[in-house]
Every structure is written in C-alpha cells, then in structure tokens.
Image (cartoon, grey):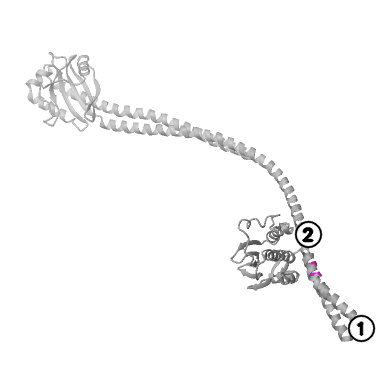
Amino acid sequence: MKNYISKIKTIYLFTVVAIMLLIATIFLYSKFEYTKQNIVKTNLGGQISYTNDITNKLEKNIIKSIKNNNLFDTLENDIKLREKIEEKLSLFITTRYRYVYIVDKVSSSDNQFRVLLDGTQNNDDKSEFLELFTPLNTKIWNKSYEYNQNEFFEHKEGMNLWMTFLNPIEINGKVVGLMVIDFALEDHKYIVKNLVDLDETFKYVVIFFIIIFFLYIWFSYFDLQREKEKENIQKQLQILNKSLESKIEDELKKSRKKDKQLLQQSRLAQMGEMISMIAHQWRQPLAAISSASLAINFKAQRENLNNEIAINLSSKIIGYSKHLSSTIDDFRNFFKTNKEKQLTSFEEIINGAFNIIEDSLLSKNIKIEKEIVDEYNFESYPNELKQVVLNLIKNAEDVLLEKDIEDPFIKIKIYKNNLECILEVSDNAGGIPLNIIDKIFDPYFSTKIKKDGTGLGLYMSKTIIEDHCSGKLEVINNKNGAIFKIVLFK
C-alpha cells in the first residue's frame, strides 16, 4: 500500500508539470501566431508605405513641371522634360522596384492605356512614348483611374511574386494619369514562407505535446492499475507464502519421517545380510573350536593328553575365540550411528568393510583387487561410508554370482583429482542395462526381486553420500562391468 500511495504522489506531481508545460506550449503558440501576423503586416505595410512616399514625391515634381495643367500635351511637346522626368523616375529603379512608369487612359477604349513616361533603364524592356497596352486586372486600373484612389494588387510573373501600386495623378480635381510602380515581393514571400514553415513546426510540436500528454495520462492510469494489482498480488503472495511455509514444514516432517523409515528398513535388510555374514564367518571358527575341544576330550579319555598337546589345542581355541570377538566388534561398530564427523580415509573405510565381507568373497572364489593411487585423510562419518562401501561390494558379489561370471573379481581404486577424494568399486559382471541405469538409485527399485531385494540399498547409499556427506555417488559402465564412484570433497 505504501508503494501504491507513493506512486500516486509521483504521478500527480508529473501530471501537474505536464499540464503546465502543455499550457505554456499552447500560450507560446498563440503568441507566435499573433507575432507572425504582425510581422507579415509590418513587412508588407512597410513596403506599401515606402512606395506611397515615392509616388507622392514624384507626383509633386511632375505636377510642378506640367504646363497648362495638361499632362499629355506638355509631355508630347516637351521631349527634354520627358527625358528629365524619366531620369528622375529611373532613380527609384532597383532590384525590388523594377518598373516605375506613368500612363493615361485612351478615351476611345475602356481597357487600353498608353505609356507617357517610363523610368526603365534597360532599353529592351522600356516602353515607347504613347505605346498602347492592355493591363491585367483592367477593372482595378479603371477603378483607380475613375475614382481617383490608390490601388494595390498582387500578380505573378513566372515564379516571381510582384505587387503593383496604382497612384492617380490629379490636377485641378481631375485624374490625368496613373503613376504605376511594380515592386517585388520576394523578400516578403521568403519571410512569409519561413513563418509558415515555423508555424507548421510549431503546430507539430503542440500536437506532439498534446499526444505525449494524453499518452502519459493513459499509461499513468494503467500504471496505477498495475501497481494496485501488484499490491493485491503481493498481499495474496504473503498469505500464500505463510500457507506454503506451513505446508512445506509439514511435508519436510513427513519426508524426514519417511527417510527414517527407509533408513530403518535399509538397516533391517542390512542386518539380515550381516547375520548371514556372521553365520558364515563364525561357522569355520566354531567348527575349529568344536574340533579342538573334541580332541582334548578324546585324548584326555585315552590319557594321551600331555602338556604340549593341551597348550597347542587351547592356543587354537583362544585364537578362534579372539577371531569371533573381533568379528562381533566389527559388526557392532558397523551399526553405530556417528553423531560427529571424524578424521578418516578411504583405505580405512575399505579395510573395515573387508574385515566383514572378505571371507565371504574368498569362499565364493571372487578375486579382490586393490589399487591405491593417492590417499588423503578427510572428515566424514566412517560407519555410514562403510555401510555404502559394503553395500556396493555386496551388490557386485550378488551380480557376479547371479551371472555365474568366469574368473570374477571386484576392484577397489582410490585416487584424488584436485580437491576430490575418489573411491571406485567396479566388477566384471558386464555392466548395468542402459534401460535401467537411470533408475537404480530410485527407492524400492530392485533387480533382486527373486532374492527378496528391498530396493533401498542404493537409494540409501546415495542419500548418505550426497545428503549426509555432501559428496556425489555416480555410476557408469565400462567394457568389463559397472563402476560406482564415490566422490568426497576435501
């Protein structure tokens, strides 16, 4: 909820700033439009005002030079005056003010005018005295002439824009001619064009700001909706997490209970195998003890028991008894639960395992090979590791006997790889079928169903190595058989 409120405040602040920027942009645009109109009017008005000043000055000079108040007669009869006035007119000819001339209207025609004076300096463009022409926009020319009023109108000459200014020349209340000035509007056109371009750009900027503003409002709304949904989801997740934590804790308890049950089942299965091994290992010593006792009894009855024979037979009985006692200690230590890690080594582990199972292997003609390349001490749980090694060796023994392998052997190899201490248990039983090699560590999966296999041995072995000892238990096949690899980290 705090994040949602903070988000609202941030969006509100940015919205206020965006509205102020939008208002400022619209205000600047309106100000620009007003300024643009003033620039256009001022520029064109300045040219018109300047043109009006020119015509007024020329008109005064011309009227002073006219005799008998008759413009046409005076100019027709006085060539020098004509040249003098045309020279004055030419002084105003520039690239902007291209044509300055004086005309009057032909009385016999409504549309024709004749040239009286022409200030053009270029003889090719200069009109002759009394040259007749029909102007464009004759209505405006006639209106200016008849009503004695100044007229302005635009027209194009090719790609150029021009403005024509008509100024009536009045003598004694009568219009006797028109002073005509054509001036270029290219500068005005250039200014207007740039102002129009700037105006278009400004419009796009305003439109862009408006679009951005509404997009911002749109996305802000959805952002708030998403933030609100996020807050709701987070609340739901918190509730769900609490529920999941409780469920996970319950499941962990069940899993631990299950692991204990599996471990107990595995231990019971191993105990069965151990009892079988104990029986096997005790059978020979017990038979030897029984035989020595019978010999003592027999010789005593025949009175042939001398000290030497008694000492020899009693020594054998003592030796067999020690072997039995040692066997009991080995099996008792095997089933002890280590509470703390101890310093040990793989060589110590396999020696302990072979003390239990070696006689069984040799009695079944299974050869034992040991290869100790490197040996390092490490901290772990010796008895649990001994259970794993014994389980791997017992599995190898079972498969060798089941397949009736000729010259069977079990190989133990100890070596290191950087900080890894590795023990390999391999055999020559042909390996594990590829269709089950990925399943052999699963609980209750067994290939020894006919022999009442529980399917827990390899599962518990992997659990001990990986969960208890923080190592790895892997299996691969080679050309001879399977290789189980125990990897512990030093």
Q: From the image, tell me which residue sits under label 2.
A: 268
Report whether residue 16 is seen: no
Front one among 130 and 236: 236
| Quarter where residue 412 is shown | bottom right
> With respect to residue 76, does 357 lie above or below?
below
Task: Return the residue nearer the eye: 109 or 289.
Answer: 289
Kind of residue at badge 1: Arg
The magenta stretch spans which residues?
Answer: 328-332
Magenta stretch contains residue 330: yes
438 is higher (above) or lower (below) than 32: below
Position in image of residue 275 (x %, y %) = 79, 65
In the rendered view, does 87 fall on the left or right side of 367? left
Q: The C terminus appears in which quarter of the rendering?
A: bottom right
Query: x and y percent of residue 195 in the render?
Result: 34, 32
Secondary structure mostly seen in the magenta stretch: helix
Q: What residue type is labelled 2?
A: Leu
SS at mark 2? helix
Residue 159 vs residue 61, the one in the foreground? 159
Residue 78 falls in image quadrant: top left
Question: Which label is found at residue 302?
Answer: 1
**Residue name at image x 31 percent, y 32 percent:** 193
Mark 2, Cα crowd under 10 Å, few <14 / some 14-19 / many 20+, is few
Label 2 vs label 1, nearer the camera: 1
* C-beta proximity under 8 Å, tags 2 and 1: no
Q: Which of marks 2 and 1 is nearer the N terminus?
A: 2
Mark 2–mark 1 distance (CA, rounded to whole Å): 49 Å
The quadrant of the image that shows the N terminus is top right
Horizontal and vertical percent position of residue 387: 73, 64
- On the image, the x and y values in percent for residue 182 come to 21, 26
In the image, 109: left or right of 159? left
